[in-house]
Image (tube, rainbow, N blue to C red):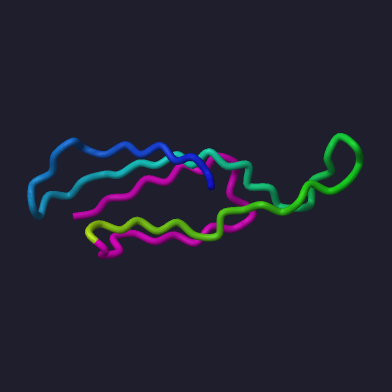
Amino acid sequence: MARVLINLPARAKRGEVIEIKTLIAHPMETGYRVGPIGTAIPRDIINRFVCTYNGAEVFRAELFPAIAANPFIAFFTV
């Protein structure tokens, strides 16, 4: 499991729009890169990111191999 850093306001009022920022520590290997001994580095990518609050989904993103290592995701929600 990747390590995730999350930054969000300490408090939010009902109905207030807030920004949530995440940084996911993950290599996002496509499987096309060659390692130091000449063999392909196995594919290892995050396919989706889902954020829930009290069981309700507030944000969803699909990620693809073109996403860089350690993806940063920021979004606004109510």
Residue that lies at the very extreme toward the right in this rendered image: 38
5 relative to 26 in the view: left or right: left
Identify the residue at horizontal 26%, vertical 39% (top origin). 8
Q: Which residues are magenta?
A: 55-78
Would residue 66 be counted in the magenta stretch? yes
Q: Quadrant of the C terminus?
A: bottom left
Identify the residue at horizontal 64%, vertical 55% (top origin). 65
- Residue 47 placement (x, y as % from top left): 55, 60
Identify the residue at horizontal 79%, vertical 51% (top origin). 32
- Residue 62 placement (x, y as % from top left): 49, 62
- Residue 50 placement (x, y as % from top left): 40, 58
Residue that lies at the very extreme toward the bottom in this rendered image: 56
- Residue 44 placement (x, y as % from top left): 66, 52
Identify the residue at horizontal 40%, vertical 42% (top origin). 22
Quarter residue 26 falls in: top right
Would residue 25 be counted in the magenta stretch? no
Does 39 appear above or below 63? above
40 relative to 43 in the view: left or right: right
Does 47 appear above or below 7? below
76 relative to 23 in the view: left or right: left
- Total marks shown come to 0
Between residues 1 and 41, which one lies in front from this camera angle? 1
Quarter residue 35 falls in: top right
